[in-house]
Image (tube, rainbow, N blue to C red):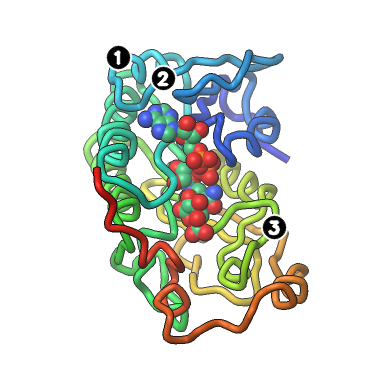
Amino acid sequence: MGIQLHEKLLLTGAAGGLGQALRQRLKANCKVLRLSDRVDFGAAGAGEEVVLADLADAAAVDVMVRGVQAIVHLGGVSVEGPFGPILQANILGLYNLYEAARKHGVKRVVFASSNHVTGFYRQSETITVDAPPRPDGLYGVSKAFGEDLSRFYFDRYGIETACVRIGSSFPEPKDRRMLATWLSFDDLHRLITACLSTPVLGHSIVFGMSDNAVTWWDNSGARHIGFAPQDSSDIFREAVYARTSAPDLTDPAVQFQGGAFVKAGPFAD
Ligand code: NAI
Ligand code: 15L
């Protein structure tokens, strides 16, 4: 399913949930898949390299990036929490990644942004990729920073980036909200493949969702990426409704797209 355009592709966050889901799938996109995380996740297999690095460590990130042609960047703090780790991994870490990409001539990045960049829009709204950010927490703010930082590195240095505002990428939707936000692992791989292979990516924002009947996001401004989802949360709808209770419409987690993230925290550092 992948298109092999790159000799060596870097996947960060390889030990995480999505990293594990993509490890085999992304081998179709390159000759050598370099895997990185800050925690040990075992040895490299055939066609793989492992380079451990903490994103906050500029020298380690430089080594991690050297020699690759493109990056799928999943590494970092993936939920709302104290600002310290978010600052280190998602803000300083992203700066280190783009500085290394600039120094080593990497020209394309797929950045795992998040729907929490726009989590304070209502579930009754449909927003486009151009809607102004309304982050629902410090995590969402850090992803909005990543979208702006990558735009700067495109405008100034020509590094193309797809900011993929992933909805909820899990084996199945866990609740009623995820019927709207769900992105299957195969569709995630299709989307990353599209971002890596579209001829002209520029700096783009795209929502990462499957072909769900209920949706809050309009990807028509990202048609140039060529993403055509093939899965849908709809096959899970009946089962999800059966095991969950009717939503409390006064609950902010039900009113806003970010769900429970909109009422998380504050956290002590
Ligand atoms: P995860 O939390 O399972 O994986 C993140 C990985 O990043 C972990 O293996 C962790 O060790 C690594 N990491 C954290 N701090 C680091 C640091 N300072 N240096 C190096 N590595 C570090 O998250 P998941 O679910 O796999 O998500 C991957 C990416 O996609 C994240 O950036 C997340 O924000 C984004 N995303 C995921 C969604 C989902 O539904 N799974 C939805 C929206 C965005
Ligand atoms: C995210 O950004 C998180 O990384 C993931 O764990 C999910 O909670 C997802 O958003 C979501 O909104 O469901």
Q: Where is residue 102 in the image (x, y as percent from the top left)?
A: 30, 25
Contact between marks 1 and 3 (CB within 8 A): the answer is no
Q: Where is residue 213 in the image (x, y as percent from the top left)?
A: 65, 75
Mark 2, ligand 1, within 8 Å: the answer is yes
Pointer 1 and pointer 2: residues touching (CB < 8 Å)?
no
Question: Does any portion of residue 145 appear in the rendered image?
Answer: yes
Q: How crowded is mark 3: few (under 14 residues within 10 Å), some or many (20 or more)?
A: some
Q: Which residue is drawn at 32% across and 22% down?
A: 100
**Residue bearing mark 1:** 59
> Would residue 207 be visible to someone looking at this image?
no
Which three-letter amino acid code belongs to the residue tagged 1?
Ala
In the image, 203 versus 234, the foreground residue is: 234
For label 2, the crowd category at 10 Å Cα-Cα, with few meaning under 14, some 14 to 19 and many 20 or more, is many
Disc 1 CB within 8 Å of nearest ligand 1 atom: no
Question: Which residue sits at x=45%, y=14%?
Answer: 67
Q: Residue 32: where, in percent of width, then height? A: 61, 18
| Distance CA(mark 1)–CA(mark 3) | 38 Å
Give the residue displayed 64% in from the left and 31% down from the top.
23
The residue pinned by badge 2 equals 53
- Disc 3 marks a residue whose amino acid type is Glu
Q: Quick check: 101 left or right of 245?
A: left
Q: Is residue 85 left or right of residue 22?
A: left
**Which callout, 2 or 3, points at the residue further toward the start of the chain?**
2
Q: Which mark is residue 155?
A: none
Quadrant containing the N terminus in the rendered view? top right
First of labels 1, 3 by sequence position: 1
Q: Quadrant of residue 6?
A: top right
Upstream in sequence: badge 1 or badge 2: 2
Q: Which residue lies furthest to the front in this view?
A: 268
Which residue is identified by label 3? 172
